[in-house]
Amino acid sequence: MKTIKSLGLTILALALLAMAPAAIEKSDTEQSHNHNSDIVDLAVQTDVLSTLVAAVEAAGLVETLKSDGPFTVFAPTNEAFEALPDGILESLLMEENRDQLIEILTYHVIPGKVMSSDLSDGMTAETVQGTEITISLSNYGVSVDDASVVQADVEASNGVVHIIDAVIIPQPESDSSY
């Protein structure tokens, strides 16, 4: 019974996600929905991910995300970055804060290729950063920590991108803060 209920919720969540009006224009990802493009090229070709591209470049993660992978990237939109408190993004993009930027960006990446059909409610996955994210499925769609997936399963040659509406932040250690 529990399995049937869980399966039903998964199907409902995926159906709602597919039917929900996307915050992303199709043209933004149609051109980049090319299995020959790696994750970085896909992001470069997707207008709503330009801030993420700038952050990946500032963090020195371009070559890593162009490598074979596979990777699953939860990619925040430009609006997600704009929603951060004033000054945070600018601060993170400074060379002296590169380690913090890397920590936040690698929290958005999990090793392996995880499609939306592989997700289950309450699922956790270890990120490249080293801590876990939590996946939630509900009548409203799929969430990763406190971010909602606005477009799922954008495939790349070295993995998959799920576009999200918020920047997710790893829980800080007691001796650091973001």
Image (spheres, grey):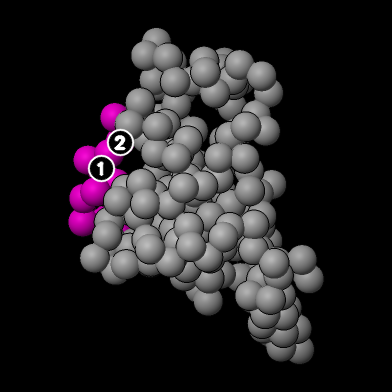
Instruction: Please tell me how crowded label 1 is: few (under 14), some (14-19), or many (20+) other residues with Cα within 10 Å.
Output: few
Is 61 included in the stretch rendered in magenta?
yes
Residue at mark 2: 61
| Above or below, 69 relative to 48 | below
Q: Is residue 112 visible?
A: no
Q: Amino acid at mark 2?
A: Leu
Segment colored magenta = 60-71
Report which residue position mark 1 lands on.
64
Residue at point 35% right, 26% down?
58
Q: Is residue 121 left or right of residue 81?
A: right
Kind of element beneath mark 2: loop
Which image quadrant for residue 77?
Answer: top right
Point out residue 119 in the picture as x, y percentages from the top left corner: 56, 69
Which quadrant holds residue 71?
bottom left
Label 1 secondary element: helix
Task: Report whether 137 appears left or right of 177.
Answer: right
The residue drawn where x is 24% and y is 65% is: 36
Asked if the magenta segment contains residue 57, the reply would be no
Q: Nearer the viewer, residue 120 or 88?
A: 88
* Contact (Cβ within 8 Å) of mark 1 with mark 2: yes
For image coordinates 21% across by 50% down, the residue present is: 67
Amino acid at dot 1? Thr
**Which image quarter: residue 159?**
bottom left
